[in-house]
Amino acid sequence: MAGRRTTSVANNDVWVLTEANGAGSTPQWIKPNPIGTPPDARFWHVAGYSPASNRMVMATGRRDLPTFVKFNDVWVLTNANANCISVSIPNNLQALRNTTLTVPVNVTDTTDSGVLSFDFTLNYDPAVLTPLATPFDTTGTLASGFTVTVNSSTPGTLIVSGFGSTELAGAGTLLNLKFTLNARIRMVKM
C-alpha cells in the first residue's frame, strides 16, 4: 500500500502486509524504509503490485492541502515486498592471543533481491582487535566475485563496501573479516 489520507492529511508512506495469502503465520503490517526520493504525498491514486517482478507501480492521485494538486505521474517501487536481507555475526567466535580471528558476516537469502553492492560499518574494540593489513577474505563466500574495499583508518571502525556485475544469490557467508587478537588478551569470545 502506498499513500493514503488520514483526516485531512495526505501521506506518502509505504506499508506491506506480510503473509497476506493466509498460508503462513499471522498477517502483519510492516513499514519498510525505501531508499530514494519518495513521490509527493497523495490519495485517490491507482497502485498495483506484480509478484513476478516484485514491483509496485503507483500513478496519478491528488492532494488537497496546502494547495490542490492533481498528479499525472507514475512511480515504481522495486523490491516492493520488503524482503529485507538480515546480516549477522556469530556470537560464539573464539581465538587465542596473537592469532587471527576470522569473523564471518552472514546474510539471509539474497536470491532475486537485485543486490549488486553492499556497504556496512562494523564497530569493534581496538584494545581487543586489530584488523589485518587485508582485513577481509571473499574466498568461498557469496561475495567471491565482488570487488571489496575496506576503510580501517579510524581505530574501532571498519567501513566495508563491495560491488559486482552479477547479483548475489543464496544465503550464507557474505565475506569474512580478519583481525589479530591483541597480545594483552588471552582469548576473546564474541
Image: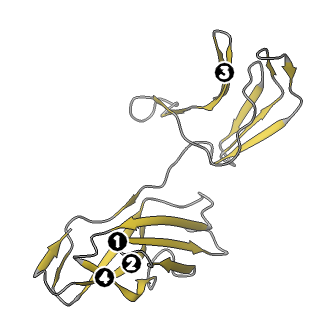
Q: CA distance from mark 1 to mark 3?
A: 44 Å
Q: Is residue 136 left or right of residue 57?
A: left
For disc 3, the neighbor class at 10 Å (few under 14, some 14 to 19, many from 20) is some
Label 1 and label 2: CA atoms lie apart by: 17 Å
Q: Secondary structure at mark 4?
A: strand
Q: Residue at x 23, y 64 (%)?
A: 91
Circle 3 sits on which residue? 4
Question: Label 1's element?
Answer: loop
Q: How many marks?
A: 4
Sequence-earlier tag: 4 or 3: 3
Question: What element does badge 3 sit on?
Answer: strand
Q: Quadrant of the N terminus?
A: top right
The answer, for residue 170, to whether it is visible in the render is no
- Are there few (<14), some (14-19), or many (20+) residues within 10 Å of tag 4? many
**Which mark is first along the chain, 3 or 2?**
3
Q: Which residue does the numbered mark 1 point to in the structure image?
A: 156
Q: Residue 130 has which mark?
A: 4
Mark 1–mark 4 Cα distance, whole angstroms, equals 8 Å
Mark 1 neighbour class, 10 Å CA radius: few under 14, some 14 to 19, many 20 or more: some
Pick the residue in front: 52 or 119.
119
- The residue carrying mark 2 is 176
The C terminus lies in quadrant: bottom left
